[in-house]
Amino acid sequence: MTRPADAPIAPTDTPAPSLWHFLGIALSAAVLLLVIGLGLVLVVIPKATGATSLTVLTSSMEPGLSPGTVVIVRPIDANALHIGDVVTYQMVSGDAKVVTHRILSIVSNSEGPRSFIVQGDKNSAPDDDPVLAEQIQGRLRYAVPFVGYVNNVITGANRTWIIPVVTVALSGYACFMVVGGLLDRRKTHKRGADADDPALGLRDAEHDLAAGVTLFEQSVRGGAVGEFEHGVDVHAHGSAGE
């Protein structure tokens, strides 16, 4: 007795992922890399090296350091400074207000303490008074342009509405990704592809949303903003063009 062979199973066509799927993945990856990169250069590295994040408020150091640039300044022995170094110094010794300018010349003699003549790159003349060693707060390590504008927005009174707005935006983005994922799964199911659990995409998106909101709130209420707030007093000596 023979048994008829089973009929071959016709292959099913699995639809290719949609353009929105690829755009969502690319956008998520770009945002994640941006957040990680900024966290490293603005918070992790400064904390690890004992440096400070400060925000440039005026244009005296243009074109190299435009307003809105965040500068990372690390303490240094004044004897290790050289002509051409960019330093942050207190306008008055012990005062919180600081200036970030370039060393133009160094005055050193046996009759008095070592001092520095500094000048903004855009300014036409040196600063009025020589800078003493005890006024030097540190030397420029590196700078990140434009990030200071973000700092000015999310600090102070603006923080009370920035957090809810960004939280809603993240929630909307997560909903968009969830709906897109469920629609793709529904199309796949209708065409005979493997029907995975539709709730899987929802659970993953909820997890990603919670992680994203938590990371944002921690950044705004803690680390990154805490570092930035040290920089609100950074300004040039006089107005632009002096």
Image: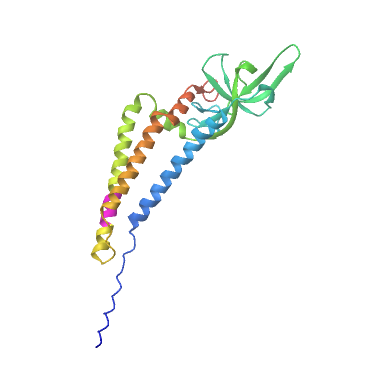
- In this rendered view, identify the residue nearer to me: 188 or 169: 188
In the image, taking residue 202 as reference, residue 139 lies left or right, namely: right
The stretch in magenta equals 177-183
Q: Quadrant of the C terminus?
A: top right
Residue 121 coordinates in the image, percent (x, y): 59, 28
State which quadrant residue 212 falls in: top left
Residue 49 coordinates in the image, percent (x, y): 57, 31
In the image, taking residue 236 as reference, residue 113 lies left or right, namely: right
Q: Quadrant of the N terminus?
A: bottom left
Residue 222 coordinates in the image, percent (x, y): 41, 29
Q: Residue furthest front?
A: 1
In the image, taking residue 226 as reference, residue 109 lies left or right, namely: right
- In this rendered view, identify the residue nearer to me: 85 or 117: 85
Residue 19 within the magenta-colored segment of the rendering: no
Residue at image x 37%, y 55%? Answer: 22
Q: Relative to residue 125, is residue 207 depicted above or below?
A: below
How many marks overall?
A: 0
Residue 169 coordinates in the image, percent (x, y): 31, 40
In the image, taking residue 80 as reference, residue 19 lies left or right, namely: left
